[in-house]
Amino acid sequence: MKKNEKIIKQLIKLLGQEKVYSSLEDCLCYSYDGTFRTGVPSVVVRPSSTQEVASVMKLASQENIPVVPRGAGTGLSGGAVPVEGSVVIDLTSMNRILKVDPANMLAVVEPGVVTAHLHKTVEEMGLFYPPDPSSANVSTIGGNIAECAGGPRGLKYGVTRDYVLGLEVVLAGGEVINCGGETIKNVSGYDLCRLFVGSEGTLGIVTRAVLRLIPKPEARRTIRADFKTIEEAAETITAILSAGVIPAALEIMDDVTIRCVENYLRVGLPLDVEAILLIEVDGPALSLPEQVKTIAALCQQYGAARVRVAETKEEETELWRARKSVSPAVVQVKPTKISEDATVPRKNVPALIKAIKEIARRYNLDIVIFGHAGDGNLHPNILVDKSNPEEMERAERAIAEIFQAALSLGGTLSGEHGIGLLKAPFLEMEYGQSGVALMRRIKEALDPRGILNPGKIFGGARN
Amino acid sequence: MSNEAKAVKDQVNRCSKCGSCREVCPVFIEMNSEPWVARARVQLASAALEHQVDFSHRYKEIMESCLLCKACVAHCPNGVRVDKLVLWARQEAVKRQGLAFIKKVLLHNILRYNYRLDLMAKILAAYQATGIRLTPKDNLLPHFRTVPFRRLWHPKKLKKPSLVVAYFTGCMTQYVYHQTGRAVLHVLEENNVQVVLPEQWCCGMPALAAGDLQTARALAERNVESLTKAGVDYIITDCASCGEMLKGYGQLLGNDMARKFSGIVQDVSFFLVHTIGFRHPDKKVPLVVTYHDPCHLKRGQGTWAEPRKILAGIPGLTLVEMAESDRCCGSAGSFGFTHYDLSMKILQRKVENIRATGAQAVATGCPSCRLQIECGLKKADISMPVVHTVELLSRAYGLGMEGEAAC
Ligand SMILES: Cc1cc2nc3c(=O)[nH]c(=O)nc-3n(C[C@H](O)[C@H](O)[C@H](O)COP(=O)(O)OP(=O)(O)OC[C@H]3O[C@@H](n4cnc5c(N)ncnc54)[C@H](O)[C@@H]3O)c2cc1C
Ligand code: SF4
Ligand code: SF4
């Protein structure tokens, strides 16, 4: 690996020795994210203020060195996987919640704040920050913003984008800008906040965020329904939403997932059904019994083989246990899981599931399907063994076909994980040449030298 | 590829790099940067396997800063045995570069010989009697006894015992916490269990943790031979680390005799609850107690309900659970000495959790944890005794508790 000693010296001068890691060992510890891709950076810096981030960016742009921002490194599309020779900016030292303002219902945070820490802090004050990626216990707000993270609550409450009121961003040349602000309404100029949300660290580095909060729902209830066919499950979902009930979560597990989980947990999950739906409603305690009744009745009406309503906290945990155990359960089958997030309009969920099953059969792969059925965001997980190159190759071809299937059903490559490295080759499939060219022009306008997280979203080498 | 390398590779491949270990790794929580988390250790082990890194100072620093507390293992959705990877990494480093001088002296020249250990304890006891303190780390040293436990105390001969067990006393009971050893003898006698004390050596955990497989195996062989000769029904431990180590002899030595040996090792609390079904005591012990789960007992041996069952069986005693009762106290054998500041930070959180319970005493099932927690409480100016669970049971059977050793 080529080391740029001069740059390292300058970085140390800017930030101090203890905030600069340059040994090969340290760089290896920053060479991955939540995917199986890796890349070794030349140096890692751990700034603790906006000024420090700005000074690093200034240096990087002068010297024309690629920079990779990084939160907790849980991303599932390779966004934080370093480009060889890059400077990684680890933002987790900037982890203060600067203010929670109950009157204006907002929080101002640094990018390294762990999502669950924000959840806990605001919930103790009766407030609520809804975006809830399953990785919330470790993921950072900066990473959530850069990926526009979603989660089970997306159906009712929306995703990260819907809660970002304002951002402070360090641009490629080291300039610091603010967009949006602390108001709910704001239409002055272009909506730059929306541009930066989901930009995967390719347009700027988020150093501060103003996040919208809402009142914490008073109570919640959970229902589980088992269905003999996927179609019945899908019809039930449409029926529930048409009846005016919007669940806080509406999760689906397919038959392969159910079998894996049952093998692992042995809790008596039904093995003769094609789908299990887990439905959670929340809101004022008084409104819940009525909602639960409506949902249970609709499940029954649309052919559920069995409906269970959790009456106690323990029962609720028990119902969720199967869903939460999917990760440990599936790795019992094969050690490596590739987690995709193809997303389609809700009504096409059964068609997508069918298509994925067909692909799994053709490529002779184990694919479990689960995810957020309420908003059409499925997580087909392909179970493989990383050390088997032939199988990995089959998996890659299957993934390309899954994307194709999602797009032909009016969907998108990614509902919440982002494009990063893994899906970059497919972007044109979704937006066409002109669509991607426009995105490139935006990228070039903000980052003319192409130093911010190069290779991500668009693929290829720098520039 | 050797079988060992294959096993390492298998574990490495299981890691999906999901980062969930960032939530629980106590070392990461204090240091808050990636190299200190379990996932990074997996990556470095993998790099070592691929000959991408040599066993540099930084590499060893990262591998040595692991508590082997298994919090990551228990939490990992893929069940990656990070502790095993770390041990492998340490062993490889020792294989290539040998042990650091001081470790070599301790492990090769002292740990393997009981009379030298006896002598060292004696010297330390004498040093402590002078009242001199050379470094703040001295506070981590327990009060050494001048005479080792097995020389001082002998089990009573019972007429018609229901079972015969060998008591593996462990170095801490042997040289420091005699009160635990006496309680074990007493409690087992109360339950009509004949105890024997065959010749025995250090369990080898300090050597294994330092990557010194050779010493660990040598000690394991000696213990297996000596304790097997005793022909007992069970081998009982009062120390979570010794217990886990002895249970691992089968795998470590890979022979039938060792496997058989490991199969009859039981932690004293497990033995009391499941094997013998301990007699419920009648004396009241009016104490509010909180219980700390040693890593090597809960995650190492799956024993956490049993000590609580014992405590629940003591009349007058109230158990209040502390938050994160199974979070590592930061002791981890010699870790407290080699990583003093870090260990103290981890300990601080434990002490806060203990304080918040308002309990009058702390019970635990591992003498190392006990020593560490005693230090933490003393540093925080909290006067609260820390005892082994069996000491409370012994008291409920009527044996007086010896003055709790403070550190
Ligand atoms: C077990 C597991 C479950 C998951 N579940 C979900 C889920 O339910 N929903 C979901 O949406 N995602 C999920 N994810 C994916 C991942 O957790 C999210 O994408 C998360 O937002 C990433 O946050 P991070 O802090 O780990 O970011 P990283 O992985 O470190 O970075 C992600 C991207 O953001 C960029 N970035 C990071 N910080 C900044 C910053 N301050 N400024 C600019 N760019 C930045 C990086 O360059 C990279 O491109 C899951 C991942 C795992 C491992
Ligand atoms: S929790 Fe397990 S699988 Fe996930 S990164 Fe840590 S060691 Fe790897
Ligand atoms: S064993 Fe403990 S200290 Fe070591 S990596 Fe796992 S959680 Fe961290």
Image: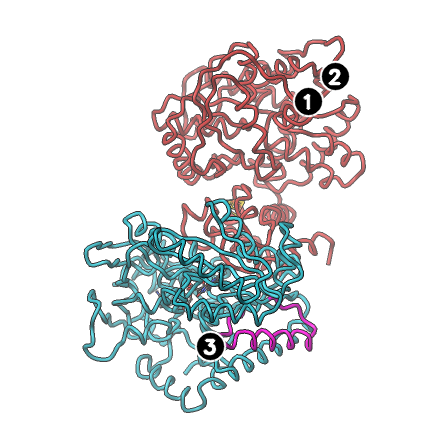
Give the crowd class for mark 2: few <14, some 14-19, many >=20 residues within 10 Å: few
Residue, disc 2: B162
Tell which tag, 1 or 3, sits nearer the viewer: 3
Residue B107, percent from left and from top: 62, 33
Q: Residue at x 66, y 15 (%)?
A: B191
Tell which tag, 3 or 2, sits nearer the viewer: 3
Q: Which residues are magenta?
A: A340-368
Residue A103, image quadrant: bottom left
Give the crowd class for mark 1: few <14, some 14-19, many >=20 residues within 10 Å: some
Chain ID, red in image: B
Residue, disc 3: A345
- Labels 1 and 3 in the same subunit: no
Q: Are the residues tagged 1 and 3 within 8 Å (C-beta)? A: no
Q: Earlier in the sequence, mark 2 or mark 1?
A: 2
Q: Nearer the viewer, residue A302 or A400?
A: A302
Residue, disc 1: B276
Q: Is residue A17 visible?
A: no
Q: Are the residues tagged 2 and 1 within 8 Å (C-beta)? A: yes
Q: CA distance from mark 1 to mark 3?
A: 62 Å
User: For chain A, what colour was chosen?
Assistant: cyan
The secondary element bearing badge 1 is classed as helix
- Which amino acid type is marked by label 2? Ser
